[in-house]
């Protein structure tokens, strides 16, 4: 599960880099940057949901940092 989370995170970074590339190259004349940012948002939601589900099923555990002490 940790590898899947890492792969999704790397895809988010790649999508963000492609949005920056399209922003610099196209100067806002095409929808490539918007599409890249939409993919980044979708991947971020997928990452959040996968971490939540993995924690719920016990596939990943907390690091031991306690809240409220």
Image (spheres, rainbow, N blue to C red):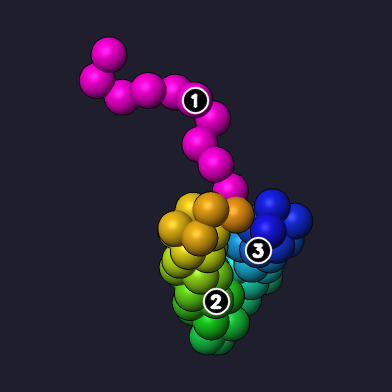
Residue closest to the eye, 53 or 17:
53
**Residue at the spot 49% in from the left edge and 74% down from the top edge:** 42
56 up-or-down from 23: above or below: above
Which residue is outermost to the bottom?
Answer: 30
Instruction: Decide if residue 7 is in sight here.
Output: yes
Residue closest to the eye, 59 or 11:
59
Give the quadrant of residue 43. bottom right
Q: Secondary structure at mark 2?
A: helix
For the residues carrying marks 2 and 1, which lies nearer the camera in this image?
A: 1
Q: The C terminus appears in which quarter of the rendering?
A: top left
Magenta span: predominant SS is loop
| Marks 1 and 3, the one that precedes in the sequence | 3
5 displayed left or right of 58: right
Can you identify the residue that label 1 sits on? 64
Q: The N terminus appears in which quarter of the rendering?
A: bottom right
Is disc 1 surrounded by few (<14), some (14 to 19) or many (20+) residues within 10 Å? few
Label 2 – label 3 distance at C-alpha = 11 Å
For the residues carrying marks 1 and 3, which lies nearer the camera in this image?
A: 1
Is 27 within the magenta? no
**Residue at the spot 59% in from the left edge and 82% down from the top edge:** 32
Label 1 – label 3 distance at C-alpha = 24 Å
Is 64 within the magenta? yes
Q: Which mark is residue 31?
A: none
Can you identify the residue that label 3 sits on? 8
- What segment carries the magenta color? 60-69
Can you identify the residue that label 2 sits on? 39
Is disc 2 surrounded by few (<14), some (14 to 19) or many (20+) residues within 10 Å? some
2 up-or-down from 40: above or below: above
Give the quadrant of residue 20. bottom right
């Amino acid at each position: 599960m940790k590898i899947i989370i890492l792969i999704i995170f790397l895809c988010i970074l790649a999508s963000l880099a492609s949005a920056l590339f399209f922003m610099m190259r196209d100067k806002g004349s095409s929808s490539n940057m918007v599409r890249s940012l939409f993919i980044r948002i979708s991947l971020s939601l997928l990452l959040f949901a996968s971490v939540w589900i993995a924690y719920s099923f016990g596939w990943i555990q907390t690091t031991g940092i306690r809240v409220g002490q």
